[in-house]
Image (cartoon, rainbow, N blue to C red):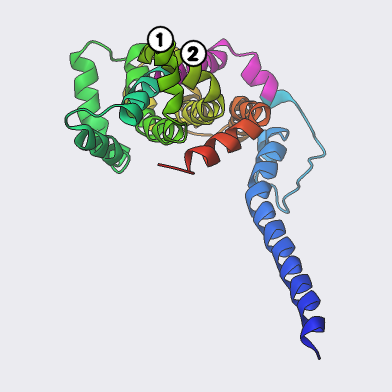
């Protein structure tokens, strides 16, 4: 068999293997979500029926009705929106200013500060629960929005600063110089030139930040006391009663809680991926 004959066969085998691998990976990732969706439409008594059924004969929207018709459950969603949106806006604002400084200026201890920012990413969040709890209580921010927002920002800011610094590094410094030639200053260069052309990077960082804040569980549990301040992840946990679990409502709330992130990703998908890849080109 000649080399010319072997090459097409090897390509076919490689392509077939790739398709099979992607299919298995897709099934592994998608089936739990599909089962979660299926469970949300079942009566609670059929969740552990044997043999299991993907589509129940008693298909029902009762779980969604129970969630959407309960003011306390809707409050969890409102809290999550308030905290996640505030964290995203503030993180982007601080990250843009800090990243511009790291990218364009030389100042004392810049490398040390950058190392501290990176090191925060390596600290397991659970080790910081007790220190942050004491700090938040001492500042009078326990069971408040500012307490949650500031705490979430500690974990979203390092990634945002790292990504935006890398993104600004891909933009030529001649842009800043041209603004200064026209009589502008660094502030003008940042907000009039660099920020508008950095929209893909801002979207990538913003979507990631929103996801982190929306799904955060540990500090949302530790830093809140009353149900009117708790977020969606805590609301799902509260459906686990002492004597019974509302499995169908838990799955319904999980589906509803996934929708905002899914919608954000679908809307900004191209710019999200473009922002991630652009920031990875040059650091």
Residue 145, given in percent of the width and then of the height, sits at 38, 12
Q: Which residue is mark 1?
A: 184
Does 170 sit left or right of 21 as displayed?
left
Q: Is residue 218 magenta?
A: no
Residue 14 lies, with reference to residue 239, above or below; the image says: below
User: How far, Cα to Cα, is label 1 from label 2?
Assistant: 10 Å
Residue 253, given in percent of the width and then of the height, sits at 60, 27
Quarter containing the C terminus:
top left
Mark with earlier residue (1, 2)? 1
Between residue 182 and residue 37, name the one nearer to us.
182
Task: Kindly identify the residue that appears in the image at 80 percent across and 89 percent down.
Answer: 2
Task: State the image quarter where residue 89 is shown.
Answer: top left
Does 109 sit left or right of 171 as displayed?
left
Task: State the image quarter where residue 13 is shown.
Answer: bottom right
Is residue 55 in view from this perspective?
A: yes
Residue 250, given in percent of the width and then of the height, sits at 58, 31
Looking at the magenta stretch, what is its main secondary structure? helix
Task: Kindly identify the residue that appears in the image at 44 percent across and 11 percent down.
Answer: 182
Is residue 144 in view from this perspective?
A: no
Residue 144 lies, with reference to residue 205, above or below; the image says: above
Q: Which residue is mark 2?
A: 192
Residue 277 lies, with reference to residue 75, above or below; the image says: below
Task: Kindly identify the residue that appears in the image at 46 percent across and 33 percent down.
Answer: 167
Is disc 2 placed on a helix, strand or loop? helix
Considering every residue shown, the one lying at the far top of the view is: 183
Q: Which residues are magenta?
A: 64-91
Circles 1 and 2 in contact, beta carbons < 8 Å: yes
Q: Residues within 10 Å of mark 1 (few under 14, many from 20)?
A: some
């Amino acid at each position: 068999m000649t080399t010319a004959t072997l090459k097409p066969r090897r390509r076919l085998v490689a392509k077939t293997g790739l398709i099979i691998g992607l299919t298995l990976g897709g099934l592994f990732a998608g089936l739990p979500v599909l089962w979660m969706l299926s469970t949300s439409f079942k009566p609670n008594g059929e969740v552990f029926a044997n043999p299991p059924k993907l589509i129940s004969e008693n298909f029902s929207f009762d779980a969604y009705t129970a969630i959407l018709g309960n003011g306390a459950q809707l409050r969890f969603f409102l809290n999550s929106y308030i905290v996640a949106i505030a964290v995203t806006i503030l993180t982007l604002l601080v990250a843009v200013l800090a990243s511009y400084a790291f990218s364009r200026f030389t100042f004392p201890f810049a490398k040390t500060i950058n190392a501290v920012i990176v090191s925060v990413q390596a600290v397991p969040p659970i080790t910081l629960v007790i220190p942050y709890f004491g700090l938040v209580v001492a500042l009078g921010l326990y069971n408040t929005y500012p307490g949650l927002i500031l705490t979430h920002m500690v974990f979203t800011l390092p990634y945002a600063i790292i990504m935006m610094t890398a993104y600004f590094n891909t933009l030529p410094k001649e842009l800043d110089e041209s603004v200064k030639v026209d009589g502008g200053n660094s502030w003008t260069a940042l907000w009039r030139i660099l920020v508008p052309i950095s929209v893909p990077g801002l979207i990538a960082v913003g979507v990631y930040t929103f996801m982190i804040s929306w799904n955060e569980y540990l500090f949302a549990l530790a830093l809140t006391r009353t149900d009117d301040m708790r977020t969606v992840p805590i609301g799902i946990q509260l459906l686990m009663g002492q004597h019974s679990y509302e499995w169908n409502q838990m799955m319904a709330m999980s589906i509803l809680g996934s929708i905002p992130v899914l919608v954000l990703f679908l809307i900004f998908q191209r710019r999200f991926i473009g922002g991630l890849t652009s920031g990875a080109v040059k650091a």
